[in-house]
Image: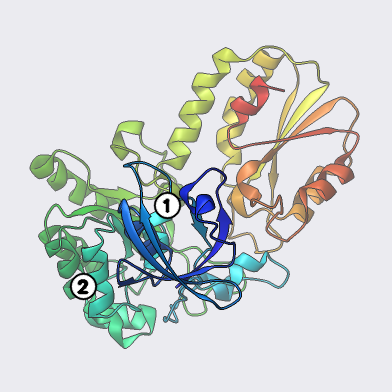
Amino acid sequence: MVRIVEVQSGSVAEELEIEIGTRIVRINGERVRDGIDFTFLVADPELTLEAVAPDGTPLRLEVERDPGEVMGLVPAPDKVRECANECVFCFIEGNPKGVRDSLWLRDDDFRLSFTYGSYVTLTNLGPRGLQRLVDQKLSPVYVSVHATDPEVRQRLLKNDRAGLIMDQLRTLLEGGLEVHAQVVLCPGWNDGVHLDRTIEDLWSLGPGIRSLSVVPVGLTRYNLNRPVRLLTKGEALDALAQVNQARSRAHQSRDFGWCYAADELFLTANRPPPGLDYYDDEALVENGVGALRRFLDDFDSGLSDLAPIPVSGVRIVTGTSMAPFLRERAGRLSTALEAPVEVVPVKNRLFGDTVTVAGLLPGQDIVDALGEGQEGELVLLPGEALNGDALFIDSMPLAEVTSRLAPARVEIGYEVTATLRTA
């Protein structure tokens, strides 16, 4: 069942005097298991709702709506289905104390895959769960495959059900769903010949496997070499060659790339990111595939729109991996703004220097790297380092960082040039 947390004004639900806290048990005789069920079932214009009022009174409501008329019931967020695996590279094991609460959640929920593009392993779904995906056409599904060899995948995920992945994928594809797959590449575990097999197996399933992303494992100082290590430059180059071979075949057979190396793989291999055409429709940016190229292109194209700003200087905060790209552009940015521009790469002391992205920068490390703020200067902080509650990864509020950098002016933005246009 689902519990109603909001009744929209002017809606059918308000006319029926449905109260907040009402629990919806069945719709048209079908059991409501969660918000996905509710969304699908409530779409019918003729509804029979079996519910329980906040005081425990059973309710049976008959509803007839015009097509497109809003029902107006908002259910509470579903409890997230947690992971049943003990992956050898699990990010939870890399967390220090004091990070945001959300980082301790071991989520592996197919509903988040459908609604947000989160990757899931499918190990906590039996035949009925897979059939539900098919019945409700929850497509595309984003699947962390990692390896198609059953023994290798079982070793990586420490789950006996992990070896069923090829049969599970066939079930989804035969049901008409599409899948985006990913491999988190762990040297000595699923690289080399194992990556070749994974690429071949997924390709053999046909065009229903819409993409394969190859992402190098990310580790912090808390789980480095326990038991997985980072890729070397040579190993990253080898993986890029394997990806490129797969891409060559895909272009010849299906007229698009299909297999994509994540940004971090290019950085580890010390290779420049490819052009935007490498990424086809850019559907995988949230998985770190093409985000760097898009940022750089947007930055470069946005420079021509900038005008001088009345500041004594600009300091741009970023992670150590992004700093070289911003430094290459700092001179042109300074010319456009008619103000000195300094790029400030922040070393991540909380997670360790193996973590180089701006999105995981702690507030304390940012403050320490910047030192005192100066009157008249503009400090640009990476927006991806903050969550919806304006907290950095170490739970430091943005307000505290801003206060400690006073009297400098602090701005937040996902795109530096977009922020400067309004600065």
Q: Which residue is drawn at 43% across and 54% down?
A: 116
Measuring 34% from the left and 50% from the top, which residue is drawn there?
261
Question: x and y percent of residue 152 in the render?
Answer: 28, 79
Q: How crowded is mark 1: few (under 14 residues within 10 Å), some or many (20 or more)?
A: some
Q: Residue furthest bottom?
A: 160
Which quarter of the figure has residue 4? bottom right
Residue hosting label 2 = 168
Disc 2 or disc 1, which is closer to the eye? 2
Q: Can residue 384 be seen in this view?
A: yes
From this view, report whether residue 112 is shown above or below residue 262. below
Q: Which of marks 2 and 1 is nearer the N terminus?
A: 2
Can you give x and y, in whole percent of width and height, for residue 253 in the image?
A: 8, 44
In which quarter of the view is residue 254 placed?
Answer: top left
Q: Dot 1: what SS?
A: helix
Residue 401 left/right relative to 157: right
Q: In which quarter of the image is the N terminus?
A: bottom left
Q: Which residue is drawn at 30% across and 54% down?
A: 44
Of residues 331 and 247, the one drawn nearer to the viewer in this rendering:
247
**Mark 2 touching mark 1, by CB under 8 A?**
no
Does the rendering let one see residue 117? Answer: no
What's the CA distance linking mark 2 and mark 1? 22 Å
Can you give x and y, in whole percent of width and height, for residue 373 in the image?
87, 37
The residue to which callout 1 is attached is 287
Query: Of the residues shown, which amino acid type is indicated by label 2?
Result: Gln
Amino acid beneath label 1: Asn
Identify the residue at horizontal 41%, vertical 52% (top origin). 265
Left of 174 or right of it: where is 405? right
User: Which label number is shown at residue 50?
Assistant: none
Crowd around label 2: few <14 · some 14–19 · many ≥20 (10 Å): some
